[in-house]
Image (tube, rainbow, N blue to C red):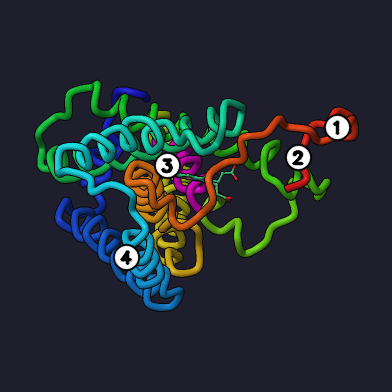
């Protein structure tokens, strides 16, 4: 199953160009959803105003080379390894889900645009698609069942669903139904395979059509914010925030009673 291109098998029912139009429509939905989200929250306007204001209290003018170095370091560390999540399970789960999703989407685009016209896909590309979906499931289900703040810190049951869960649930549905579709297709279970395919399409429509209401756009905002934060640190403006106190950490013995998790 891992080395089979499920989209190629599908061309007997759905023409290649329709699959390609679907992918393009999903990209347009991301652009529209994120654009509307930015207009509604005015977060980008705030972001640039804040950056402009902070610039006035900069202690040094960064050269283009220094700026590039800060940006590259932010990409390699803060963004590529989601360092803001600390050293624990949260970060491992996120990295699994993030790279899984990137591989899954990259695999989908290559398989659909290059290998649904009769050309047979090299097996490693189909493997990338399947492995991407599996990693997304590993990171996503780990997060959903054990790491979500409302479950791990607020003692809510794992099956409690709120609007804020739209992104993670739709992402998990895409990866899970994608795998189920591919498995049932390669096992020759035709009826099941059509059912899972329809669920796969519906979950993609929810994921990409729900960008405006979900946390989808954090994958664009977070990198921007990390770059701005590190540039502000390098030029000394620190986003007009005070430097960390140069004093011993004294929180009293109460801090040892329980691991801090009620955030
Ligand atoms: C393909 C790219 C990405 C995917 C698929 C992805 C996926 C996810 C998912 C599923 C969640 C859980 C959402 C929820 O609270 O319900 C999440 C949360 C989060 N993401 Fe991402 N993400 C991506 C990129 C990024 C990037 C680039 C950053 C930072 C530079 C980032 C930082 C975070 C943070 C800080 C959280 C909160 C985590 C927590 O509460 O444990 N993400 N992401």
Q: In which quarter of the image is the N terminus?
A: top left
The residues tagged by marks 4 and 1 sit, at their Cα atoms, a distance apart of 41 Å
Direction from residue 195 to residue 257 in the image, left or right:
right
Query: Can you tell which mark lies on residue 261?
Result: 2
Query: Do labels 4 and 2 touch, CB within 8 Å?
Result: no
> Looking at the image, is mark 4 or mark 1 nearer the viewer?
4
Q: Position of residue 161 (x, y in %)?
A: 69, 57
Residue found 33% across the figure and 32% down from its top: 129
Q: Nearer the viewer, residue 79 or 148?
A: 79
**Label 4, label 2: how far apart the Cα atoms are:** 35 Å
Residue on which the image places disc 3: 178
- Which mark sits nearer the N-terminus, 3 or 1? 3
Chain-order first, disc 4 or disc 1:
4
Q: Where is residue 155 in the image (x, y as percent from the top left)?
A: 83, 46
Q: Mark 1 points at which residue?
A: 258
Q: Residues within 10 Å of mark 1 (few under 14, many from 20)?
A: few
Relative height, residue 21 to residue 169 (above, below):
below
Residue 208 falls in image quadrant: bottom left
User: Closer to the observer: label 3 or label 2?
Assistant: 2
Asked if 200 appears above or below 101 in the picture, the reply is below
Question: In terms of secondary structure, where does tag 4 sit?
Answer: helix
Q: Residue 232: x, y in percent?
A: 37, 49
SS state under label 1? loop
Q: How many marks?
A: 4
Residue 44 visible in the current orientation = yes
Magenta region: which residues?
170-182
**Label 4 vs label 3, nearer the camera:** 4
Asked if disc 3 is less than 8 Å from ligand 1, the answer is no
Which is nearer the eye, 142 or 221?
221
Cα separation, mark 3 vs mark 2, equals: 34 Å
């Amino acid at each position: 199953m891992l080395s089979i291109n499920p989209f190629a098998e599908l061309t007997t029912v759905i023409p290649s160009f329709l699959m390609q139009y679907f992918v393009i429509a999903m990209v347009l939905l991301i652009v529209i959803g994120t654009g509307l989200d930015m207009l509604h929250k005015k977060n980008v306007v705030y972001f640039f105003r804040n950056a402009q204001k902070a610039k006035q209290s900069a202690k040094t003018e960064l050269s283009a080379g220094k700026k590039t170095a800060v940006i590259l370091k932010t990409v390699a560390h803060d963004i590529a390894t989601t360092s803001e999540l600390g050293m624990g399970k949260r970060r491992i789960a996120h990295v699994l889900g993030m790279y899984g999703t990137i591989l899954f989407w990259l695999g989908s685009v290559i398989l659909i645009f290059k290998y649904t016209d009769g050309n047979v896909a090299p097996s490693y590309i189909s493997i990338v698609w399947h492995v991407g979906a599996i990693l997304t499931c590993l990171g996503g289900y780990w997060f959903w069942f054990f790491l979500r703040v409302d479950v791990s810190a607020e003692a809510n049951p794992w099956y409690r669903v709120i609007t804020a869960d739209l992104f993670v649930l739709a992402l998990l549905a895409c990866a899970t139904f994608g795998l189920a579709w591919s498995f049932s297709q390669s096992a020759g279970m035709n009826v099941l395979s059509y059912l899972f395919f329809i669920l796969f399409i519906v979950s993609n429509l929810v994921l990409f059509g729900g960008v405006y209401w979900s946390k989808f756009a954090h994958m664009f905002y977070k990198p921007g914010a990390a770059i701005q934060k590190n540039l502000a640190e390098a030029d000394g403006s620190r986003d007009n925030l005070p430097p960390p106190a140069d004093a011993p950490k004294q929180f009293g013995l109460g801090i040892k009673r329980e691991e801090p998790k009620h955030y």
